[in-house]
């Protein structure tokens, strides 16, 4: 509309998670080292405040902090506690047994448990102190292009009603022109997705695949679990062979415990419900005794990109770099991405600093980011585990065996590169699925008492999710007619099952007519629907900045 | 032109806590721009958009942490921000706050004369104070006209044209500049800041003043300078047990579950045995102080609406009489009656308990107008020197009382639900202040009951409508009727009322109904058809049923004002109140919470209506109601007995 709503910067970072903040901090450091102090670094975060949209386990591999924050002693970083007890349990419906060995890569002694929300707040302060401008509560809707090359971004217009009509308080979004744009949107970035598509950055890559993690933070009586104790569980309630994943239970300071269930979204049962599965898991004696007498503090959910090395898109282009989860930097075998997010941010920062100095922000110049990656620890780690997840398609135990052979053969396994299929395409229609449907499998365990086990609505309350009503629904039905025909009739509306926040409701009226209802206000921005909805039924677009969950210690 | 927005930062209402001392503990809650102030900020921007040369400035008074919200105002589009921040201001009541803010505005160069070109926009009230006083007090201190409870305002040919919400309708007003407006949270929603605005705000400075900077002495501000104090804060125990929610996967199951729930009865609260109150011993050797200094008697205002005395003004005579009885034997209840052709109404007031009615009959005063009315009160108070002045907490009463308070240097207590005569013991100074008016008012989202004391006469309070009974009239009662000729200047009449639109008072049937089916904004997609059908079906069954609605439904024209329940509508107490698609704004709750049984139906489980209900269904009303209507047709009457 008017030109005053255009601002410009040298580097623009989209997303204030570990990867974006690391890019900002390291770029400020690198520029300073080169004696440059006239470059503007801007970071935009959609969460109401830094940290409010970040969710992780988390157990963090702290080695990266030595190079990332060389002047800071690890004790100054607000991590939670050092891991001193680390066990992997194999659960059956009634029993639990500690595995006598750690599954490959899963040793955590010496790592630190942490709240990523808190860590991000801390990093944001460091970034601000180094001159980075951080703007939270603003949603980047899209990148802008000039001559086919990325030249910045535009934030979302606000003040429109749910039909898209401008209201009296309409506020046009701001155009930000940037020499370099770094996308650090985390898992399934909504802008990154469009850019990767537009610039064909994923040609020849494996399909990216994801898991969904559903997490609760509890406060429990003293003695239930020690800070620094971490458990991972395999087995129950997941089915070996068709469902990948497991649980995590991390003892934190002040008698808090972070726990969650992470399930691969390549499951087949259209009625599978990760949130409900987590509630079932909580009823297992091994888990319930840890929570006994406690109360829930927070709830949240988020997906993780698990495709690994072969699913990473090309993460640089003219004036553009992609870091962290958005570029697939995560090692599923370790359930860890934070250290890689930080490392990728640092590498992108180095490439950006070099490009700003030379004044050349072209693809060729930014390929330095890739060069750095190929010599990095991140590469080493991800390349070794490159077939881990694909192997687990064969089931947890068998996969474990195969992964063991992979490690011996340096990651190649016996099969070379293993392929993946899109999560949404693995899902089976009601007719095609011949297994026992979810509700039947866990009959008797799906009545939630709202004290120990929770229905989704109650849990969402603890995420503090909220969305303004006056806006276009941020969950876009791509083709309503097709949706009814395929997603409802053939698949029985799997969205209602897989969405962990009760956003989707399949409503059947008296005449038996079925329709989808969307309660967008509940959305916790996990992105599962964008990933798993059959026939790409739903696209997640970014809502108004500041809307969404409000995590404090997730 | 300069548009000055007065803004306060408040703790997020849901996270509010009050300290032991009755003062706010702001440390633990997240802070936001007070909701109503957000609407004022937007109103300022709207006027600026039409008048691009206008300058937008935002002013606030509070601790340095308020800078966060001032920055937000800057990022919404404001040009300059000023903060009055000084420890010595801590504990200021609304009188002191109004004084301090207007002193800051004067320091900024405003308020020198009536030819200036500025407009003050403010929020109607704050969520942590709920008084709605400050805009009136600032206006009086600045000596400018005002209009409160404004929904929208435009600048037309150099004058402000504003829509003011009143009981049962609205008023279009025209005010000259300079003037002050206070906004209700029903107008245009505050915009979200733009990124470019946030960037601009980041780089702009907020000017912070201390009281010395603006030459304000600490005599009349802070805890010690304020005419009122918060003497006590008690928890209000909810009288309603937690809601019983229906369970089920379809509307049939949900409605069946509701019927079961109603049959088995509501949840009950455990009633704890009340402990015998210990007689408070009066400390010995304390100096007893009668600060009234000759002031005596109780003055009330009789508000005239549509040629009749409004019900809340009659209700007011109940506490007035009670207070008089608690005071010296000859304490008089005097009522001020202002209007046109109102002599007859004076007798009605006497019948309801006024000892004397002071009548101001003037054709210019047919409709209530703040400037002449407050001036008349000031003159009457000067002449009569009452110790207490009471107003009904109507939209008029709530702006009139504080404006008068500034004229008489008294504090004002807003929206009281209990008034009593008591004493105040100051142990430090070994003094007992007695007799003193103890005004009790709910605050913090109706969760606390605060007792407020004022030490300057008249002690002014406004009383919540619907709280006190109308006294039984006695036609044989005798009283004095006096005419009063105020001296009014032309400047008292600078603002005009262009038009007053009031729905017919009518629909008495709402007061008599046993069951009221009320539709809110969430039930309007069929223009309340289903709501009306449900009420009709109940009538057919032989229950006294009526339908009603919440304010937004009236505002958008779906229903007439007479059906509006809530603070600016009717206060009802049916046996059963069925709220459909009603979010549960406090203003609505105020009008229906005395209902015996409340049933809430809404699609959003998080709406506050559910914490005020006995039975609840979460679902789309379009699905639930047809089912419910069918059940009613086959005999279900929400547990009400049917007299055919
Ligand atoms: C259940 C779970 C458990 C995990 N456990 C561990 C663990 O134990 N250890 C470990 O190391 N890792 C763990 N991970 C992975 C780790 O959390 C991620 O790899 C890491 O957070 C990625 O960082 P990031 O900066 O790329 O993305 P994020 O942390 O997701 O940050 C991205 C940020 O970008 C913002 N954003 C997105 N889109 C936009 C937009 N359009 N406009 C503006 N802002 C936007 C988001 O709000 C968000 O704040 C776990 C993940 C999950 C889900
Ligand atoms: S709507 Fe989509 S992104 Fe939001 S919570 Fe549900 S599945 Fe996750």
Image (cartoon, coloured by chain):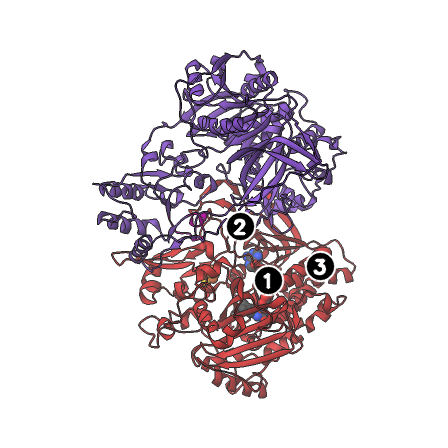
Which of the chains bears the disc numbered 2?
Answer: A
* Residues at discs 2 and 1 both on one chain: yes
* Residues at discs 3 and 2 both on one chain: yes
From the viewer's perspective, is residue A142 above or below residue A363? above
Q: In the visual, does B533 lie left or right of B218?
A: left
Please tell me which residue is depicted at 56% across the width and 77% down the height of the picture.
Answer: A231
Is residue B473 rendered magenta in the image?
Answer: no
SS for dot 2: loop
From the viewer's perspective, is residue B618 above or below residue A353? above
Q: In the visual, does A435 lie left or right of B138?
A: left
- Measured from the top left, where is residue A435 in percent x and y? 35, 77
Q: Nearer the viewer, residue A469 or B308?
A: B308
Which of the chains bears the disc numbered 3?
Answer: A
The residue carrying mark 1 is A553
From the viewer's perspective, is residue B328 above or below residue B615? above
Question: Local crowd at mark 1 within 10 Å, few (<14), some, or many (≥20)?
Answer: many
Which of the chains bears the disc numbered 1?
Answer: A
**Residue B426 visible somewhere in the drawing:** yes
Residue bounds of the magenta highlight: B599-612
> Which of the marked residues, 2 or 1, is nearer the chain's N terminus?
2
The residue carrying mark 3 is A126
Q: Nearer the viewer, residue B188 or A453?
A: A453
* Residues at discs 3 and 1 both on one chain: yes
The residue carrying mark 2 is A156
- Measured from the top left, where is residue B235 in percent x and y? 54, 46
Looking at the image, do the residues carrying marks 2 and 1 touch, with CB atoms under 8 Å apart?
A: no
Looking at the image, do the residues carrying marks 3 and 1 touch, with CB atoms under 8 Å apart?
A: no
Real-space CA distance between mark 3 and mark 1, rounded to the nearest whole angstrom: 19 Å
- Residue B509 placement: quadrant: top left
SS for dot 1: loop
Specify the colour of chain B.
purple
């Amino acid at each position: 509309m008017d030109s005053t709503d255009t601002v410009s910067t040298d580097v623009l970072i989209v997303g204030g998670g570990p990867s974006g903040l690391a890019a900002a901090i390291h770029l400020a450091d690198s520029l300073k080292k080169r004696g440059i102090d006239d470059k503007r670094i801007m970071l935009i975060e959609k969460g109401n405040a830094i940290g409010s949209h970040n969710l992780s386990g988390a157990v963090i591999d702290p080695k990266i902090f030595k190079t990332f924050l060389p002047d800071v002693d690890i004790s100054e970083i607000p991590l939670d506690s050092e891991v001193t007890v680390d066990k992997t349990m194999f659960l059956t419906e009634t029993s639990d047994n500690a595995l006598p060995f750690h599954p490959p890569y899963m040793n955590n002694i010496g790592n630190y448990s942490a709240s990523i929300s808190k860590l991000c707040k801390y990093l944001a302060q460091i970034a601000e102190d180094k001159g980075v401008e951080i703007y939270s509560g603003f949603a980047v809707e899209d990148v802008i292009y000039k001559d086919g090359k990325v030249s910045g971004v535009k934030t979302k217009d606000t003040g429109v009603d749910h039909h898209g009509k401008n209201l009296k308080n309409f506020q046009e979004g701001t155009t930000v022109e940037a020499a370099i744009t770094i996308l650090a949107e985390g898992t399934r970035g909504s802008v990154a997705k469009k850019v990767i598509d537009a610039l064909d950055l994923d040609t020849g890559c494996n399909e990216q695949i994801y898991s969904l993690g559903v997490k609760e933070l509890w406060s429990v009586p003293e003695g239930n679990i020690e800070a620094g104790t971490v458990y991972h569980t395999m087995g129950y309630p997941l089915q070996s062979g068709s469902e990948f994943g497991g649980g995590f239970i991390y003892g934190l300071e002040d008698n808090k415990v972070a726990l969650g269930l992470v399930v691969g979204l390549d499951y087949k049962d259209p009625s599978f419900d990760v949130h409900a599965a987590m509630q079932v898991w909580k009823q297992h004696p091994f888990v319930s005794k840890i929570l006994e007498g406690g109360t829930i503090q927070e709830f949240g959910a988020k997906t993780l990109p698990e495709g690994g090395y072969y699913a990473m898109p090309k993460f640089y282009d003219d004036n553009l770099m992609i870091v962290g989860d958005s570029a697939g930097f995560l090692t599923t075998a370790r359930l860890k991405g934070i250290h890689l997010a930080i490392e990728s941010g640092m590498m992108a920062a180095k490439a950006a600093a070099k490009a700003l100095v030379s004044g050349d922000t072209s693809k060729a110049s930014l390929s330095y980011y890739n060069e750095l990656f190929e010599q990095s620890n991140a590469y080493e780690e991800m390349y070794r585990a490159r077939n881990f997840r694909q192997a687990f398609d064969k089931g947890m135990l068998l996969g474990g065996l195969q992964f063991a052979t992979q490690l011996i053969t340096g990651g190649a396994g016996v099969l070379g590169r293993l392929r993946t299929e899109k999560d949404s395409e693995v899902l089976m229609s009601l007719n095609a699925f011949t297994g026992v449907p979810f509700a039947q499998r866990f009959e008797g365990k799906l009545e939630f008492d709202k004290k120990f086990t929770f229905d989704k609505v109650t849990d969402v309350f603890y995420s503090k999710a909220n969305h303004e009503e006056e806006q276009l629904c941020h969950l876009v039905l791509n083709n309503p007619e097709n949706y009814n025909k395929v997603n409802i009739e053939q698949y029985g509306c799997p969205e209602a099952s897989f969405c962990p926040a009760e956003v989707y409701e399949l409503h059947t009226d008296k005449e038996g007519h079925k329709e989808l209802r969307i309660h967008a206000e509940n959305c916790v921005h996990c992105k599962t629907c964008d990933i798993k909805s059959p026939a790409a039924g739903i696209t997640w677009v970014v809502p108004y900045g500041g809307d969404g969950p409000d995590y404090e210690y997730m | 032109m300069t548009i000055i927005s007065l803004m306060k930062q408040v703790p997020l209402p849901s996270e509010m806590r009050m300290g032991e001392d009755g003062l706010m503990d702001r440390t633990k809650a997240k802070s936001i721009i007070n909701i109503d102030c957000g609407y004022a900020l937007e109103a300022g921007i709207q006027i600026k958009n039409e008048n691009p040369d206008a300058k937008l400035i935002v002013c606030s008074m509070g601790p340095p942490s308020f800078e966060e919200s001032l920055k937000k105002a800057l990022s919404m589009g404001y040009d300059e921000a000023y903060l009055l921040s000084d420890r010595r201001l801590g504990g200021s009541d609304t009188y002191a706050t109004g004084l301090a803010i207007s002193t800051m505005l004067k320091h900024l160069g405003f308020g020198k004369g009536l030819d200036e070109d500025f407009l003050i926009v403010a929020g109607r009230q704050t969520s942590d104070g709920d008084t709605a006083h400050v805009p009136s007090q600032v206006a009086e201190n600045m000596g400018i006209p005002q209009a409160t409870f404004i929904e929208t305002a435009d600048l037309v040919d150099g004058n402000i044209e504003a829509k003011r919400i009143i009981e049962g309708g609205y008023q279009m007003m025209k005010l000259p500049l300079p003037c002050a407006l206070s906004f209700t949270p029903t107008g245009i929603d505050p915009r979200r800041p733009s990124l470019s605005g946030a960037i601009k705000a980041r780089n702009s400075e907020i000017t912070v003043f201390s009281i010395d900077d603006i030459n304000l002495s600490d005599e009349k501000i802070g805890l010690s300078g304020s005419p009122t104090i918060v003497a006590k804060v008690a928890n209000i125990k909810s009288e309603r047990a937690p809601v019983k929610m229906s369970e089920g996967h379809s509307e049939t199951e949900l409605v069946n579950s509701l019927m079961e729930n109603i049959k088995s009865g509501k949840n009950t609260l455990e009633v704890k045995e009340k402990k015998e109150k210990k007689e408070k011993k009066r400390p010995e050797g304390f100096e007893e102080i009668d600060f009234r200094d000759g002031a005596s008697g109780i003055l009330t205002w009789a508000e005239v609406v549509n040629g009749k005395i409004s019900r809340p003004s009659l209700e007011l005579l109940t506490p007035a009489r009670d207070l008089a009885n608690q005071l010296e034997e000859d304490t008089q209840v005097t009522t001020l009656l202002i209007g046109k052709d109102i002599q007859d109404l004076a007798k009605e007031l006497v019948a309801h308990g006024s000892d004397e009615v002071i009548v101001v009959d003037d054709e210019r005063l047919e409709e209530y107008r703040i400037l002449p009315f407050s001036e008349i009160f000031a003159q009457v108070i000067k002449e009569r020197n009452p110790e207490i002045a009471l107003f009904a907490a109507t939209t008029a009463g709530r702006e009139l009382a504080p404006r008068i308070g500034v004229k008489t240097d008294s504090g004002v207590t807003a929206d009281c639900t209990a008034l009593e005569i008591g004493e105040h013991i100051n142990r430090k100074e070994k003094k007992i202040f007695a007799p003193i008016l103890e005004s009790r008012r709910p605050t913090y989202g109706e969760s606390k009951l605060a007792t407020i004391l004022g030490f300057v006469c008249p002690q002014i309070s406004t009383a919540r409508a619907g709280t006190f009974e109308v006294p039984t009239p006695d036609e044989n009662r005798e009283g004095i009727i006096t005419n009063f000729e105020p001296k009014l200047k032309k400047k008292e009449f600078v603002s005009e009322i262009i038009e007053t639109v009031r729905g017919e008072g009518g629909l008495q049937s709402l007061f008599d109904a046993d069951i009221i089916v009320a539709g809110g904004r969430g039930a309007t997609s069929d223009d309340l058809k289903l709501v009306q059908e449900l009420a009709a079906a109940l009538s057919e069954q032989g229950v006294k049923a009526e339908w009603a609605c919440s304010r937004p439904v009236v505002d958008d024209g779906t229903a007439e004002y007479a059906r509006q329940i809530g603070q600016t509508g009717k206060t009802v107490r049916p046996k059963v109140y069925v709220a459909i698609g009603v979010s549960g704004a406090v203003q609505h709750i105020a009008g229906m919470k005395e209902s015996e049984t409340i049933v809430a139906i809404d699609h959003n489980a998080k709406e506050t209506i559910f914490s005020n209900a006995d039975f609840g269904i979460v679902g789309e009303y379009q699905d639930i109601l047809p089912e419910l209507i069918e059940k009613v047709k086959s005999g279900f009457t929400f547990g009400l007995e049917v007299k055919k």
